[in-house]
Image: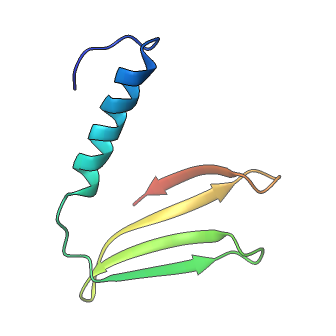
Amino acid sequence: MSDFSWSDYGRAYKAIFDAQQDIASVATDIDKVELTKNADGTIATLKKYKGATLLFTLTFTYFADGSLQSISRS
């Protein structure tokens, strides 16, 4: 990542965008995605699989007002 000043929004945006593109272009063997929901309809977990093997789980937690608080990976 290049050096930039946080006040230089154009370059900061480009650095973030470039990093996102690198992450999104990573080849994976994921062939199944499974979601579970809470009673209120929000996503509780997102599980990614390669065949029958669970690769990882994302667990979502929410504030009392329903906004997203955190996402943890296990």
Left or right of 62? Residue 3 is left
Q: Quadrant of residue 50?
A: bottom left
Counting from the top left corner in percent of width and height, residue 24 is at: 28, 56
**Closest to the observer: 53 or 31?**
31
- Residue at the (27%, 83%) spot, across then down: 31
Counting from the top left corner in percent of width and height, residue 40 is at: 78, 74
Locate the N terminus by quadrant: top left
Counting from the top left corner in percent of width and height, residue 58 is at: 46, 63
Locate the C terminus by quadrant: bottom left
Toward the bottom, the furthest residue is 52
Counting from the top left corner in percent of width and height, residue 23 is at: 26, 50
User: Which color mode does the image show?
Assistant: rainbow
- Labels in figure, total: 0
Toward the right, the furthest residue is 65
Left or right of 38? Residue 4 is left
Toward the front, the furthest residue is 10
Q: Quadrant of residue 34?
A: bottom left
- Residue at the (24%, 88%) spot, across then down: 51
- Residue at the (57%, 79%) spot, across then down: 36
Left or right of 2? Residue 5 is right
- Residue at the (48%, 54%) spot, across then down: 72
Q: Quadrant of residue 49?
A: bottom left
**Closest to the observer: 43 or 12?**
12
